[in-house]
Amino acid sequence: LYIADDRVKKQEGIKNKLEKIVPELKGLYRDTKTRPKIRVFEGEAGLRQVYFDIFNVGIKDIRVFEDLSNILKIFPDFVDYDSEQRLKRGVNLYSIAPAKKEIMDICLNGPVINKEVLTFIPKEKFKFPVDVTIYGDRVAFASPKDLFGIIIEHKEIAEAMKNAFDLALEEAKRLYKKDNPQAKKRQN
């Protein structure tokens, strides 16, 4: 009887501890509807999917931090395909890019596709090791150097990134005008 009674007390102690822990564990693993959907892509084909996912979503505006010269090393047809698809789908572009001659020549001398706000900043101030695209409720990160990309689908994350981009765009416009008083084409 003594052994059985001792076991019952131990089991009740364990039960009490579990009853205290279970609510905390449930709190850690809440089944929430707002979890971000995260997809990872690898290789050239995966990277192409990341760059052109914008055309799989019915959006009208994209915001990008990108170094086009890195993209063109992997996808020489990038500008043609991107321009064609943006024109076809009525997608507007807001871009912050490094002020590299080859990028500015392509961007400023090509046709205007829908609304384009192209802003260039001194390349030493462009500190983005990966390209970032914000569109709809998604944010894409792409690394042409390492051939991988990530798409995060989450309304609040995308909204936070849109707001951060819009603030950065205002500062980039100021820098651009200051450094390039003669080059105000396509900057609203």
Image: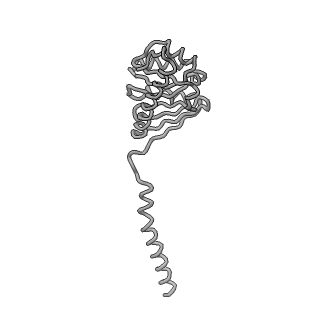
Of residues 72 and 100, the one drawn nearer to the viewer in this rendering? 100
Of residues 112 and 124, the one drawn nearer to the viewer in this rendering? 124
| Residue 174: percent from left, percent from top | 46, 25
Vertical placement of residue 26 versus 120, above or below: below
The residue positioned 46% from the left and 29% from the top of the image is: 171
**Is 33 on the left or on the right of 181, as rendered?**
left
Q: Is residue 46 visible?
A: no
Q: How is the image coloured?
A: one colour
Of residues 169 and 13, the one drawn nearer to the viewer in this rendering? 169
The residue positioned 38% from the left and 46% from the top of the image is: 33
| Residue 49: percent from left, percent from top | 51, 29
Q: Quadrant of residue 23?
A: bottom left
| Residue 153: percent from left, percent from top | 44, 38
Vertical placement of residue 87 versus 61, above or below: above
Quadrant containing the C terminus in the rendered view: top left
Residue most extreme to the bottom: 1
| Residue 54: percent from left, percent from top | 44, 28
**Is 101 on the left or on the right of 170, as rendered?**
right
Q: Is residue 40 visible?
A: yes
Vertical placement of residue 81 versus 160, above or below: above
